[in-house]
Image (cartoon, rainbow, N blue to C red):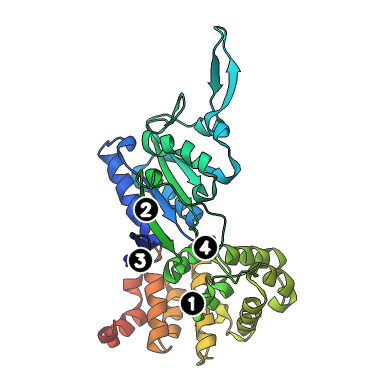
Amino acid sequence: MIMDNTNTNIPETSVGEVIHTLSDLYVNAVKANIPFVSLPTPFLWGSFGVGKSEGVRQLANTIEKRTGKRVAVTDVRLLLFSPVDLRGVPMASKDGFSDWLMPRIFDMDRSDDAVNILFLDELSAAPQSVQAAAYQITLDRVIGEHRLPDNCLVIAAGNRTTDKSIAYSMPKALCNRLIHFSVRSDVRSWLEWAKKNAIDSRIIGFISFDNSRLNITPETSDMAFPTPRSWSFVSGLLKTMKPAKTTDMHMLISSAVGIDTAMAFEEFAELYNRLPRIDDIFAGTCRERPQTHQVLYALVSSLEAAICERESISDFELENVCSYVSHFPPDFAMTFFKDISNMNFLKSRLTKIRSLQVWLQKNKRSL
């Protein structure tokens, strides 16, 4: 759902929603052969770690799938650039004038079966001299003598001055050359992304249980705090270390998300040691039925992760899992069934799963 951000007079939305909107815009432009230069450059405003960069990569994958074109992203962190870096290096020409060598960021695939995305990240953190150099790129797709290829889209992003990060006020002249979106962290969108990108199921279960822990605005003195980005760090650390207990990794986990959140996560993760065996549920031999909410959150996320890992799951196993989950409290069962119905490799098969159809018939009033 999009809401007005009255502080900045721009729409506030999730990463998933804005990527969906931009995907439709760009796919329509490709199919209708509308020049990219006629489309305004979007600017994604948002706090650090909410997934702006990852969202642009998702956008590239979506455009690629829906148009059949190769899509390449050139990620430019403007905070590290000077105006000269964007224009290129001057060199003397034979006639006594100077020419400018083209920067590598303009070396793109110009063929008709390709789409390029120039992602100008951290634009609001760049000095105003660099922001001024971005004027030409965002509106005219040129800087100095260099012109972006016709098949190039430009997207910009940055933090707000209120995000406790490096950020300069953007000149109104540049603001008016862009279309603006205020991007917030969204638990549902992140959970969908996390399941598709093999984030540790314990983290998925923990964030499902305590939504407030996905993204916490840090105190001025905080160095480590939870964001979608830092949770992906924790997932990578867990996959690398494979600890018997998450408490064995307390120092590493707390270095990413902070001590308080790390302790809460570790306590939740210990529930996984008391979960029924997933293989027994798949085999239809599990008779243990947890009742506490914490354990149910953990079990739902664990089952969903196991299904994602086993795309070759048989109808027999799928029937067993659905039959087992159908005995959960309705809100947990509904969450599970909705989530697996969004898994593309299962959609055509779920109508054959009798236990699911029986549950849907009994609970249709609550859907």
Cβ–Cβ below 8 Å for labels 3 and 1? no
Q: Earlier in the sequence, mark 2 or mark 4?
A: 4
Alpha-carbon distance for marks 2 and 4? Answer: 17 Å
Which x, y percent locates residue 45? 44, 56
Cβ–Cβ below 8 Å for labels 3 and 2? no
In this view, the mark in front (3 or 1)? 1
Which x, y percent locates residue 316? 44, 75
Alpha-carbon distance for marks 4 and 3? Answer: 40 Å
Q: Name the residue under label 4.
A: 163
Q: Mark 3 points at which residue?
A: 347
Q: Which residue is drawn at 48% across and 32% down?
A: 108
Question: Label 2 is placed on what type of residue?
Answer: His
In this view, the mark in front (3 or 2)? 2
Q: Which residue lies furthest to the bottom in this view?
A: 291
Are there few (<14), some (14-19), or many (20+) residues within 10 Å of tag 2? many
Q: Please state if 106 lies on the left or on the right of 81 as rendered.
A: left
Give the quarter of the image for residue 11: bottom left
Element type where label 3 sits in the image: loop
Question: Label 4 is placed on what type of residue?
Answer: Asp
Which x, y percent locates residue 19? 38, 55
Alpha-carbon distance for marks 4 and 1? Answer: 20 Å
Element type where label 2 sits in the image: strand
Q: Mark 1 points at which residue?
A: 211
Question: Label 3 is placed on what type of residue?
Answer: Lys
Q: Is residue 192 above or below residue 173?
A: below
Q: Which residue is drawn at 45% across and 47% down?
A: 156
Cβ–Cβ below 8 Å for labels 4 and 3? no
Q: Which of marks 4 and 3 is nearer the N terminus?
A: 4
Q: Name the residue under label 2.
A: 180
